[in-house]
Amino acid sequence: MPTVSSRGDAMRGLAVFISDIRNCKSKEAESKRINKELANIRSKFKGDKTLDGYSKKKYVCKLLFIFLLGHDIDFGHMEAVNLLSSNKYTEKQIGYLFISVLVSSNSDLMKLIIQNIKNDISSPKPVHVNLALHCIANIGSVEMSEAFGQEVPKLLVSAHASASVKQSAALCLLRLIRTLPEAMTYAEWASRVIHLLNDQHMWLTAATSLIHTLSQLSPGDYKGCVSLAVSRLSRIVTSTYTDLQDYTYYFVPAPWLSVKLLRLLQCYPVPEEPAVRGRLVECLETILNKCQEPPKSKKVQHSNSKNAVLFEAINLIIHIDSEPNLLVRACNQLGQFLQHRETNLRYLALESMCLLAGSEFSADAVKKHRETVINALKTERDVSVRQRAVDLLYAMCDKTNSEEIVAEMLAYLKKADYAIREEMVLKVAILSEKYASDYTWYVDTILKLIRVAGDYVSEEVWHRVIQIVINRDDAQGYAAKTVFENLQAPACHENMVKVGGYILGEFGNLIAGDERSSPLVQFNLLHSKFHLCTPSTRALLLSTYIKFINLFPEIKPTIQNVLQNNNQLRNADVELQQRALEYSQLSSITSQDVLATVLEEMPPFPERESSILAKLKKKKPASVQVSLVGCFMCKDHATMSVLLNHIPVWVSLTPYLSPTFASVQVNYYIISTNASSNYTIVLFQQCLYMDAFDDVLTLPADLGESPSTESTEHANRPFMFKNSGVLFENALIQVGVKCEFKEQYGRVGLFFGNKTGNQLQNFAAAVSLGPEHQGKINVATQKEPPSQIDGGAQVQHFINLECISMFSGSPNLQLRYQHSSAPQQVTLKLPVIINKFMEGVDMNSGDFFSRWKQLGQPTQETQKIFQARHPIDTEAARTKLTGFGMCALTNVDPNPENLVGSGIIKTKTSQIGCLLRLEPNKQAKMYRLTVRSSVGEAAALICSMLEEHF
Amino acid sequence: MIGGLFLYNHKGEVLISRIYRDDIGRNACDAFRVNVIHARQHVRSPVTNIARTSFFHTKRGNIWLCAVTKQNVNAVMVFEFLMKMIDVMQSYFGKINEENIKNNFVLIYELLDEVLDFGYPQKTDTGILKTFITQQGIKTQIETLVNGAKTKEETTQITSQVTGQIGWRREGIKYRRNELFLDVLESVNLLMSPQGQVLSAHVAGRVVMKSFLSGMPECKFGMNDKLVLDKGNKTNDELSKNSSGGKPSIAIDDCTFHQCVKLSKFESERSISFIPADGEFELMRYRTTKDISLPFRVIPLVRDIARSKMEVKVVLKSNFKPTLLAQKIEIRIPTPLNTSGVQVLCMKGKAKYKASENAIVWKMKRMAGMKESQISAEIELLPTAEKKKWSRPPISMNFEVPFAPSGLKVRYLKVFEPKLNYNDHDVIKWVRYIGKSGLYETRC
């Protein structure tokens, strides 16, 4: 124990100094006093006098105090380090304190400090070892982890170290592991550490923390701790054992240790052996039983520690999730807490119940508390508790109680806190959709939702309503009626106008029979909101108007008036202007029949996961679930093939949103009048794809051609740089592609989607190799597509490829099918191009130029000088080159504008190295492209392929 | 306009709180306390904006004065007002400290009612205020005061005077001896490079008049301002005779006058004529930047001898007439923050290392003109953990000299009193010049 210094540890000087500071009347006076003291200490530390340990300690203490007051200290470190080598406990202690507080981890003194700590760690006096361990943990730097990562575990498992040293060592090790997990090797002392759980002493809690962290790092090594932990837990919990009676805290035996053990057990699955398992269950039961007993003390500490153990036990029960009895009991216990006075308890109870609601055994038990939870939502004062109540309501909702819960949530939404409104809106939307038995109820709920909390209703929510209404014939009439009624309110939210615009545009005719909602009334109602809306809503309303022209020819003049109004035709917003102009032209030029086909009702949407759910998941990053829609949103090329399933939905919604749609649609209809309405969408989709994949938006030139045979030369170009996308699309079929290439092997996945409502028959897809490809590519079909594709369905077709030797161009894919007994044939170019088999090779400047010179023969080089087709941008060119398959090398060419790349084409028979230099001339907007390759043909081929793209 | 006024003691406790406008809440004084008085970092700006409320503060001793407003007021006006308020309080109860303020609560609130109306500054002249706020301040030393009740006549007189044209002087003043004192008080500000190059210099000066004159005299003040003289040369033959004596004239950059000066006359004729307030008042304030005669020159010499030692040598030269004597000279040489010991050697005066201020302070009682003196010091340094460069703050000095460094001279002050029968010659006039140091710094 600390040795008391002969002069006493009072340090009067320090006390006087501190009281002086505290008596200072102003900041100035304080800083004066501190300056004086600092000058004094500096003169003492000058070095010509030797100070005894006591005064050194005193001055270091003063410095520490000054530092903690917020002043800079830049001396005295050496003196503090000197204190470490003192033999007196107090001096050492102050030295360590100063070092842990003040010395930065990159200080020059660190080596000296580490040496001192090493001495102390091996000291026979336990207090010194403890001080050293505390210092290591307090600094806790990477350097410390490296220096002591091996020493500390030795102390932990050594036979003669005292309990207090072991405790410090365990905590110190914990800190070091958190700093630098890789510096430790756990396996070798795993078993010995586990057996620390058998120890009798108080430092068990520290050891349990350590084991908890270790078992998270390498669960396998510490598996053995489960049974030990269970037996330890049962010894604590069952009162017959008395070995831990000394650690009772307010009548609760060793609460901290219990909590840690319970947490440790949550790292592992339920123990297999029946004995251990039985014992664990018994323990948990005992803990639950204890809560029923009357409290032994009124002190808050007693109930707090008891509840801490209980909640951790409940967490473990949830983790085990196979003991119905325990789950129900836990749920009942939590139910009692729901009405507890203590806010924290109510919060915790709600939170745990949320988890319980997810378990099949306790879900019913949770539902019993519905009334209480709803009550909590209404009366709770703390917003975080209310949030938990919302979560719980969401979790416990099912078919039987959904109507009530949704109604309650809607009622609460009116006065809910702004922070949780958006989440609540999403939850209400999901619940009402998920458990809707009657779609009129669903429509009512969502419309009410928009009315109550319009600002918080996101795009996804109202998109979803429309999807559902369109897909449900039975709900359409009702929806139109309710929307109309809702729109009659003097002030309605913009989202309501959007929903109203869309639904009336589609199904306005269903309610037009009524006098009160005659076409003109409908139109006037919508148009009265028009001026109050944002441009995107106005654009949607314009689409609604053109749909009205189709639905109700009798009000055509009125609508045309509106469309031709200068407010629209000369609107500052280009989108509105364009729509107004084109719609008015469409309505005046085309015949009624054309109009009817163009403006046909939207086709039903394919069923898919609710986008709202995806949004809710996105709001909670904890639940990492990659939903399809999530990918959909991220616009990643790699996931595009997944997208193919969902595009129609997107597209059919987009006419109301996207800028380019109207023009494409109208342009097309003016040219050809005999196509089906689906085709417009197809066209549009193509544009959209182009838009998504490439910067350029090009329309196929052969618009007017008959769609029975088509080729897709033009579509192959973008595939030079990417591996997935839509290969082909027409009114009937959509072909998506996704390829993977590795060395000379390739795998092409084709996705054929039937876009019509009818079956496509005699479907066949075959890869045909032209004479130029014979013997150069091997093709094997891995999975044949079925011969029929149902309406709206999609089938897959996988092809494996092997590149034997170099080839140019790409193989063809022949598609044959029968649509309404008319045979159709399509020839497509597979996106299998020679550059797909190229792999980039990274090399430095010296390597590159030496190889460049090796390939110096005229046959091996192809050079082209050409006009730049795109603005000269080195970064973009670099990206293109990487997409092409080459490795764009940096720091090779002395001119940074020049682009240098290298790659190897891997075929079965040979490997062809290719080197490339692209030199831009910005003034002339020209490029010089030089390609050298070990095979002359390859150089020429690559050169010609790349030429068009810069 | 000013929304409220607070006075705090050094701990931040509110001593006086007077709110003039509804947009200032009671919590405003807490905001200032938390953000300025108790701020972790010392707040240097006198204007602090907290939650769209502006706080203008100044400190006298341990007392914080703070004016608050939510509007976009003229900051200079607010500070001018705060200074006036300090003057007024000082003239009522002497030194401003916590005890005096606590003893004069009633008086201060009465003053605050008078000097600000709905946040607009009103009369702040001590002399006038004393005519109607007759409460005597309670000074720390207890004085017995006779406070006679005013008759009705007197009160009506006060009203007519305060609201009248000449609000700063009441009628019927009579002195047995007509006497006046003129003080020209200047403060010199200088920043000089180590090589002796003037980086910035200006003089802020005040002319303070103390008048004990009977009746309603009209005075005319003349000085050697360039503009006044030039004007005089053209129009007034009499004046041109005086100025043609080759006396140097000075260029005043800008000046402000007491309200008694007739500005129209100054604008048109460049002459300063006025009916003076009774007692002490500040006749004018001015600023000059050209041709300043710097009374002292500081020549620093700093040398690092070794890693832990440096030497500082400072030569001080006085640069004025040998017959004059400068007083209260104090030179402050900053020392590095890791100074562990200082040895000082000086020829004259006393020098001492003051650890609490991190500076060597060299004091001399007086020094005649055209003299030279020197100090040298050896500073020992302690090696520090981090090599932080010392910022080398400038050497500053304080002094007092019996002349005006700007070169301003009072040429005449004429008194005319047509009603009472006394002559300009009968008035006893005293003129005094005091030049003080403001921020007088030399970089080293």
Image (cartoon, coloured by chain):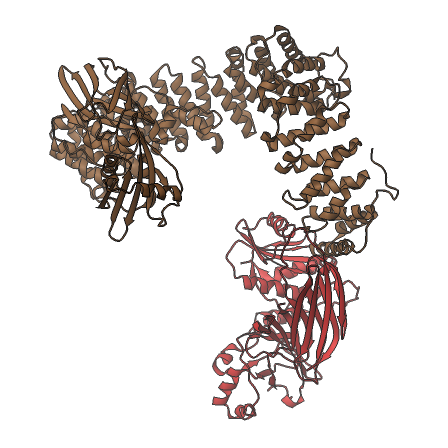
Chain colours: A brown, B red
- Specify the quadrant of the image occupied by residue A943: top left
Q: Residue at the far top: name it.
A: A274
Residue drawn at (55%, 13%) of the image:
A321
**Is A345 or A781 nearer to us in this picture?**
A781
**Position in image of residue A42 (x %, y %):** 75, 55
Residue drawn at (14%, 24%) of the image:
A709
In the rendered view, would you say B5 is above or below A659? below
Is residue A353 in view? yes
**Is A760 or B7 nearer to us in this picture?**
A760
**Position in image of residue B223 (x %, y %):** 58, 83
- In this image, A469 relative to B16: left or right? left
Picture quarter with the C terminus of chain A: top left
- In this image, A53 relative to A171: left or right? right
- Specify the quadrant of the image occupied by residue A687: top left
In the rendered view, would you say A654 is above or below A357? below
Is residue A336 in view? no
**Is A651 or A863 nearer to us in this picture?**
A863
**Position in image of residue B102 (x %, y %):** 72, 56
Count of number-bearing discs: 0
In the rendered view, would you say B325 is above or below B65? below
In the rendered view, would you say B304 is above or below A332? below
**Is B86 or A622 nearer to us in this picture?**
A622
Picture quarter with the N terminus of chain A: top right
- Specify the quadrant of the image occupied by residue A661: top left
**Position in image of residue A942 (x %, y %):** 25, 36
